[in-house]
Image: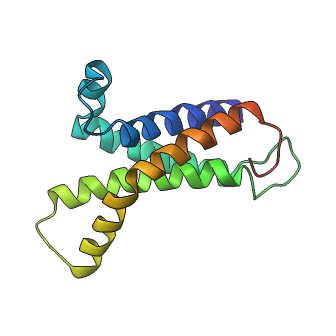
Amino acid sequence: MLPVYLLSIVINILVGCIFVLAGEGSNKVLSLSLDNEAVRLGLGLVSVIVGILKVLSPVAGNVPVVGDLVPALANLLGGGILVFEFYRSHSTISSPAAERIGELVERNKRLAGFICIVVAVLHFIFYSILFL
């Protein structure tokens, strides 16, 4: 499905830019639109939905269930982090598991951003490879 393919690439690049450019004041236009909590939550939810659709969509009719595995995982990773950050900032309940996950996310958010961007670029270039 071409629309899901395009959405996957664009969303992976946007999510990657959010994570990589987080806290840098040099990019005012990008930070003004992507620092909004509602935009980040919406982008996270759309990323998770696109990730699920990528897992379920066949690649050129070959394999009916596997789909594009690596871009789908990158969508799920980026969207999951954005949704988790929104939940963590708005939740009044604290748990040790959520704190550990939050620390893990904060340490590795920039790495996840680079992974999302690299996967998006590779998926754009090598669109016909089964798992990429």
Q: Which residue is depicted at the point 16% across and 63% down?
A: 91
Instruction: Determine whether, in the image, residue 110 is placed left or right of residue 28.
Output: right
10 versus 84 height, above or below: above
User: Residue 6: which quarter of the image?
Assistant: top right
Q: Going by the picture, which residue comes out furthest to the right?
A: 62
Where is residue 124 shown, x and y percent of the image? 69, 32
Measured as percent of width and height from the top left, residue 90 is found at 16, 56
Q: Position of residue 125 (x, y in %)?
A: 74, 31
The residue most toward the top is 29
Q: Quadrant of residue 43?
A: top left
Left or right of 90 on screen, residue 81: right
Q: In this orientation, which residue lies closer to the viewer: 67 or 117?
A: 117
Q: Residue drawn 25% across and 21% down?
A: 28
- At 28% from the left edge and 26% from the top edge, which residue is drawn? 33
Residue at x-position 23% and y-position 81%: 96
The colour scheme applied to this rendered structure is: rainbow
